[in-house]
Amino acid sequence: MEFGFTLVVLVLLMAWHHDKVSPDWSAMAWLPAYFVLTMGAAAGMGLWLAGFNAHYRDVRQGLPVVIQMGFFSTPVLYPIELVRERLPEWAVVLYALNPMTTAVLGFRAGLLGTDGPHGWAIAAAVGIVALLLVTGLVVFNRLEKTLADVL
């Protein structure tokens, strides 16, 4: 819901500033794939954290810290060029393994016409999100058996 509202506001702002923003129409075709990648990462993390939150109450206190660390390890407020300039190449590769980095770069490429993620980063992000979803399902199904007893 929030994503849809925010997207409408973004489209209106882009129309208002059409002389300063030049979307890449060919990269816009990939926006649904980046949306699915984002939703897959959120669902995978949600599956992991839902079961653990019910069994271990401390997860609730640690979750805001983890979310904030994830926020700062994703180029949301700063351009990826800052990371590429200031970190060694091996650290940039580790940084690119964050699936949300790939999603943010993909959205920026389609909407703002900036450089998109590399092909290997997209493949790695898809693999990591698939692993997160599969393991999240396994963990949640295993913890679900005792969920009623704990709650």
Image (tube, rainbow, N blue to C red):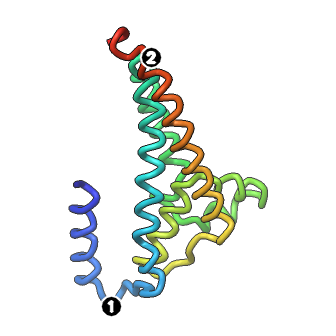
Seen in the image, is 83 located left or right of residue 34? right
Q: Position of residue 19 (x, y in %)?
A: 33, 90
State the residue at coordinates (28%, 83%): 17
- Residue 51 falls in which quadrant of the image? top left
Q: Residue furthest top?
A: 149
The correct choice, above or below, for 4 with respect to 61 in the image is below
Label placed on residue 19: 1
The spot of residue 135 in percent (x, y) is 56, 37
Q: Position of residue 72 (x, y in %)?
A: 51, 48
Of the numbered discs 1 and 2, the one sitting upstream in the chain is 1
Quarter of the rendering occupied by the C terminus: top left
Residue 122 image label: none
The amino acid type found where label 2 is placed reads: Asp
Task: Report the amino acid beneath label 1.
Answer: Asp
Left or right placement of residue 94 versus residue 150 in this view: right
For mark 1, give the secondary structure.
Answer: loop
Residue sitting nearer the eye, 70 or 129: 129
* Of the pair 86 and 92, the residue shown nearer to us: 92
Q: Nearer the viewer, residue 68 or 27?
A: 27
Residue shown at 22% from the left, 54% from the top: 1
Left of 5 or right of it: where is 117? right
Q: Which residue: 65% across, 71% down?
A: 119
Between tags 1 and 2, which lies in front? Answer: 2
- Residue at 77% x, 61% y: name it: 89
In space, the residues marked 1 and 2 are separated at their CA atoms by 49 Å
As helix, strand or loop, the secondary structure at mark 2 comes to helix
Residue 110 point in image, percent of width and height: 44, 77
Q: Viewer-proximal residue, 80 or 42?
A: 42
One can see residue 2 in this view: yes
Residue 78 drawn above or below residue 140: below
**Neighbour tally class for label 1: few under 14, some 14-19, many 20 plus, Cα within 10 Å:** few
| Residue wearing tag 2 | 58
